[in-house]
Amino acid sequence: MELRAAAKAIFSAAVDRVRPERLLSWSLAWDGSVLQVREGQTTLEYEIDRYQYIVLISIGKAAVPMAENLLSMLGNRIAEGLVVTKAMEGELHSDEEAASDLAAWPQIRVLRAGHPVPDLRSNQAGRELLALARRAAEKQRQNLRTLALVLLSGGGSALASCPAEGISAEEKAAVTKLLLGCGASIHEINTVRKHLSAIKGGQLARAFYPAEGLALVLSDVVGDDLDVIASGPTVADRSTWHDVHRIFQHYRLMESLPAAVQQRVELGLAGSIPETPKPEDPLFRSFRTVLVGTNYHAIMEAEREAQRQGFATLVLGTRLQGEAREIAKVFASMTGDILIHGIPHAAPLCVIAGGETTVTLKGKGKGGRNQEMALAFLAAMRKFPAEIRDLGDRVLFLSAGTDGNDGPTDAAGAFADTNVLRRADELGLDPEVFLAENDSYAFFDKTGALFRTGPTGTNVCDIQLLLVQ
């Protein structure tokens, strides 16, 4: 198979594995009465007929197709539900509903909210989620055995925002702005956010208690840290009020905080406000959270497809991070050893990696981290020694985002191979010049090497493929 076609097929197989409309079919088994959930090497079982009241919550950019997938299994066994997803362009009302989404299940309400910046619709969605959770908890207290099914995907933190009692959305946003302005890390910002929220940091699970719960998660986070995805509404939070106070003190923000936030911190330190749920909290004995779609799942499927095509495979991992152009040099260095020495493995070989790199912007061009990496790989190819350069037609590199969007462009990523180099030479284009301007999109657009998939509806970070035949 021609190398570009092979790379497209491998990437497509990886993305198909984590498409939300098919996602749960990989992790769940349903025989009409028992729902089985695969969690690593173990299987959780839920005898659905034993529950008298089942509710569904789905939050995130993949909320609608994930909900559809689960509803196709359980259908009318679900008594009520709320789905919160990203607003479409031009939808302005906080009660905007999509009549076409999930229309076959009238008991499920669909709300659209702001992303990546929370808006009034996000706050309404958060309040409604909390109200539904409390209704479910009350059903359990009335001796109706209740099960909460929660589906989470990327963007959930912004789409459903519910400030803690006594704090306004504006005050919470002001605190986040202060933290961003003083250089606080995302971990520090999330620590504060969880303590200023009514649903983040395990508090949605607390609202459902004593009802049983099962959360199924599509991860858009490198490393799949459950308390980071959608700010961890269904998992334990290890941070404390003392951590919050320490962060504010470290950045000398206490005097700049809104009065209501200052008061909440003081009450938290005094023990007058409950902590976020911790790992030892008994509620987590009956509320389980399972990863059903991750970068790992995607690259494992990529490996299977590459092997079906006759390639040996080498998986580097799922946590690739760092400067995109520096990572590209690693792939380029590997290429020479594979071609000349057959290490770490002889060709035909497909090297696979996943993660999320970064780009330090110095120029004024257009592109994304994947296109930048492909361009840096191409620049390295031009510098190969003659003995490696003569074998270049046997090599292809592809870096692409699983969501189909790389930076502010309509491409998922780009191909790097000798065909691109030849075309660049014909047009008088120097990869190094475009790299200096961070203008990878223009380079690959001119050379016909952009990789366009269109929006995929999923997001499990990025995938890199190095094919040597």
Image: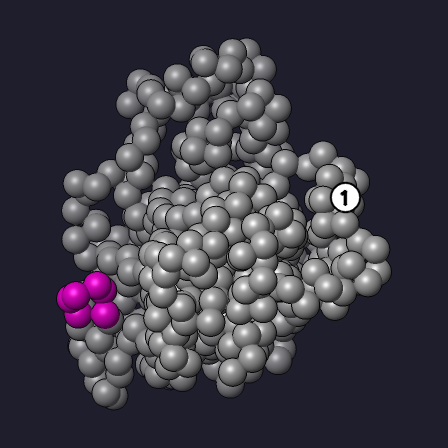
Please tell me which residue lies in front, 320 or 466. Answer: 466
| Observer able to see residue 425 | yes
- As rendered, which of 2 and 135 lies closer to the eye? 2
Which color mode does the image show? one colour
Extreme right residue here? 427
Q: Secondary structure at mark 1?
A: helix
- Which amino acid type is shown beneath numbered disc 1? Val
**Magenta stretch bounds:** 38-43
Residue 54 image point, x, y percent: 31, 71
Is 109 magenta? The answer is no
292 sits to left or right of 192: left
From this viewpoint, which residue is outermost toward the front? 387
Crowding at mark 1 (Cα within 10 Å: few <14, some 14-19, many 20+): few
Q: Residue 454 location in percent, x, y?
A: 65, 71
Residue 397 point in image, percent of width and height: 55, 62
**Is residue 257 shown above or below 204?**
above
Residue 411, given in percent of the width and then of the height, sits at 67, 63
Picture quarter containing residue 279? top left
Whether residue 106 is visible to the viewer of this picture, yes or no, is: no
Q: Residue at x 21, y 50 (%)?
A: 284
| Residue occupying the point 58% across, 44% down | 325
Number of labels in the image equals 1
Which residue is depicted at the point 58% across and 54% down? Answer: 386
Residue drawn at 23 percent across, 87 percent down: 31
In which quadrant of the rendered view does residue 134 lie? bottom left
39 falls in the magenta region: yes
In this view, the residue in front, 249 or 14, is 14
Q: Which residue is mark 1?
A: 433
Looking at the picture, does residue 69 appear above or below residue 262? below
Magenta region's main secondary structure? strand
